[in-house]
Amino acid sequence: MTGNDLEWSDVRIFLAIARHGTLGAAARQVGQTQPTMGRRLRALEEATGHALFQRTRDGFVLTDEGAAVLAYAERMEEEALGFTRALAGKDAQLSGLLRVSSSDWFGVHVLTPVFARFLAQHRGVSLELVTDARPYNLARREADLAFRITPFEEADVIQRKLMHMEYALYGRIDLVAPPAGDGAGYTLISMDSAFGTLPDVEWVKRMLPNARIAFGSNNRGAQARMCAEGGGFAVLPCPLGDTTAGLRRIDLGEAPPGRDVWLGYHRDLRRVARLRALLDLTIEALGSDV
């Protein structure tokens, strides 16, 4: 096989399998069937004359030959994505698709009302909102616009702090009194153990060290719902806690630490008209303390 014979579509399949480790997961990413992925991989290996993966009971593992060409495949991907980003960056029409990523509760309670206004004004644009804990890769066009609570570290990402988001302690509205003293005898709703070092989690542990954590979840919406059901007190972002029926703020004399919200997009998309319009409306609606 020569460089002229190598097709990007085959390299894309190689990368998907390398990243996901199984044909099924890789097929879902590239939009192919699992049998087609298997046939394309076998054809690529036959054409190159090398086994690129070792088939194991747990999935596909790169061979030495596969590992040796992985970096080259990733550079090919970056060039191909740069090709599409460069063309997208010259799109001056308010039409087409924008893919946005954020956390689940932020997407539902903060972004969706803004997006509804945007779609009413720009009926030629379609929005996809993907809510996931993992950071989507902007260079690979996994998302066109992303919202995070930490600054972006990726190269070629244009970012700005959108807003500062306040947090508060919440309890069910019919509770007679807030927890007193060290919190002994009270129950808390918090993040799961993997997120135990978040500022709001550490704050409530300091303020109510003897309160018992009865329910933990990495889903803020689930925390708010459990709080409204009377499962305990919870520290929640105010845009979520204030709009959840049956909850009220609890004052312990000191507010929990808030978080900054950052937005980011790849620099190649800075001239896309529909993205600029969405940014302008989002910044106008949310670009202040909440």
Image: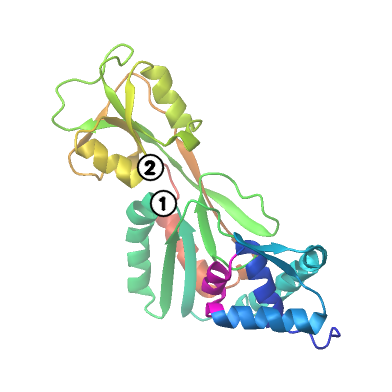
Tags 2 and 1 touching, CB below 8 Å: yes
Q: Position of residue 205 (x, y in %)?
A: 41, 22
Identified by mark 1, the residue type is Leu
Question: Dot 1 corresponds to which residue?
Answer: 286
Q: Residue placed at 61% from the left, 50% from the top?
A: 152
Label 2: element kind: loop
Query: As displayed, is residue 183 above or below residue 130?
Result: above
Q: Residue placed at 55% from the left, 54% from the top?
A: 135
Quick check: 141 left or right of 245? right
Instruction: Tally the numbered discs.
Output: 2
Q: Which residues are magenta?
A: 22-34
- The overriding secondary structure of the stretch rendered in magenta is helix
Point out the image quarter for the N terminus: bottom right
Mark 2 neighbour class, 10 Å CA radius: few under 14, some 14 to 19, many 20 or more: few
Identified by mark 2, the residue type is Val
Mark 1 neighbour class, 10 Å CA radius: few under 14, some 14 to 19, many 20 or more: some
Q: Position of residue 180 (x, y in %)?
A: 27, 14
